[in-house]
């Protein structure tokens, strides 16, 4: 593999950075397959009555059956993908992954769903279940409440018939195959 000549970025040339850009483009094109691998890795033991993968499949299936658009369904499927890399801030990691490919609203919902899910269990830990209300005036507040209420919190049911991962693969490839919004 061809490599850059520099050992410090300040010494890089245009041809060095063109080489890096070509590598990054190839790496980005492989993102959907990496994400599918991460999802498959979530199909293991879990303290829930379903695997983490099954939870994600149920969430996406509920969103799809509720008439959500393809992008929102993919966000529902990937909302917990951050568990693979960073369990303590999984929402933010999932949002960072999705941010270049999805709407501002969908990204915000994914980023905040962990806090909003606290509505259902924070009281068991002497925390305020209404902590989400600090965002009450945010334009996407209701979208996140609805995401959690209708799809996320309800998707731990071993009796629910979710669509298989293969059903969602084309949508993952479409959404994560979009041209990424520029990093700012």
Image (spheres, grey):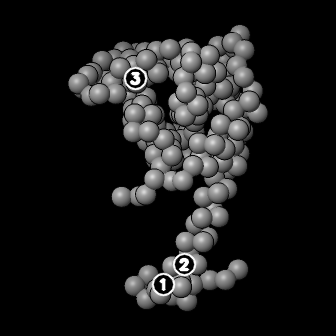
Q: Secondary structure at mark 3?
A: helix
| Viewer-proximal residue among 81 and 24 | 24
CA gap, disc 2 and disc 3: 41 Å
Residue at (48% x, 41% y) in the render: 102
Residue 67 at x, y percent in the picture: 56, 18
Q: Secondary structure at mark 1?
A: helix
| Viewer-proximal residue among 66 and 36 | 66
> Which mark is on residue 143?
3
CA gap, disc 1 and disc 3: 44 Å
| Viewer-proximal residue among 91 and 75 | 75
> Which mark is on residue 77?
none
Residue 58 at x, y percent in the picture: 64, 21
Decide which of tag 1 and tag 3 comes sooner along the chain. 1
The crowding category of the residue bearing disc 1, from other C-alpha atoms within 10 Å (few below 14, some 14 to 19, many at least 20), is few
Q: Which residue is mark 1?
A: 14
The crowding category of the residue bearing disc 2, from other C-alpha atoms within 10 Å (few below 14, some 14 to 19, many at least 20), is few
Residue 113 at x, y percent in the picture: 43, 29
Residue at (43% x, 22% y) in the render: 117
Quick check: 96 above or below 184?
A: above
On the question of residue 88 being in view, the answer is: no
Tell me whether circle 1 and circle 2 mark residues in contact (CB < 8 Å).
Answer: yes
| Viewer-proximal residue among 126 and 26 | 26
The crowding category of the residue bearing disc 3, from other C-alpha atoms within 10 Å (few below 14, some 14 to 19, many at least 20), is some
On the question of residue 3 being in view, the answer is: yes
Residue at (63% x, 62% y) in the render: 27
Q: Which residue is mark 2?
A: 18
Q: Quadrant of residue 167?
A: top right
């Amino acid at each position: 593999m061809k490599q850059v000549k520099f050992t410090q970025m300040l010494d890089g040339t245009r041809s060095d950075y063109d080489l890096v850009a070509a590598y990054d483009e190839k790496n980005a094109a492989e993102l959907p397959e990496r994400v599918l691998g991460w999802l498959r890795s979530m199909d293991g033991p879990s303290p829930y009555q379903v695997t983490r993968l099954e939870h994600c499949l149920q969430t996406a299936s509920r969103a799809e059956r509720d008439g959500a658009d393809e992008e929102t369904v993919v966000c529902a499927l990937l909302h917990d993908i951050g568990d693979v890399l960073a369990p303590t801030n999984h929402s933010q990691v999932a949002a960072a992954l999705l941010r270049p490919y999805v709407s501002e609203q969908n990204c915000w919902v994914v980023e905040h769903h962990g806090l909003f899910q606290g509505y259902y269990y924070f009281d068991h830990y002497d925390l305020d279940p209404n902590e989400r209300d600090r965002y009450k005036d945010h334009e996407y507040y209701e979208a996140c409440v609805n995401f959690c209420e209708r799809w996320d919190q309800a998707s731990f049911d071993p009796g629910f018939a979710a669509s298989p991962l293969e059903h969602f693969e084309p949508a993952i490839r479409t959404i994560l195959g979009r041209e990424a919004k520029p990093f700012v």
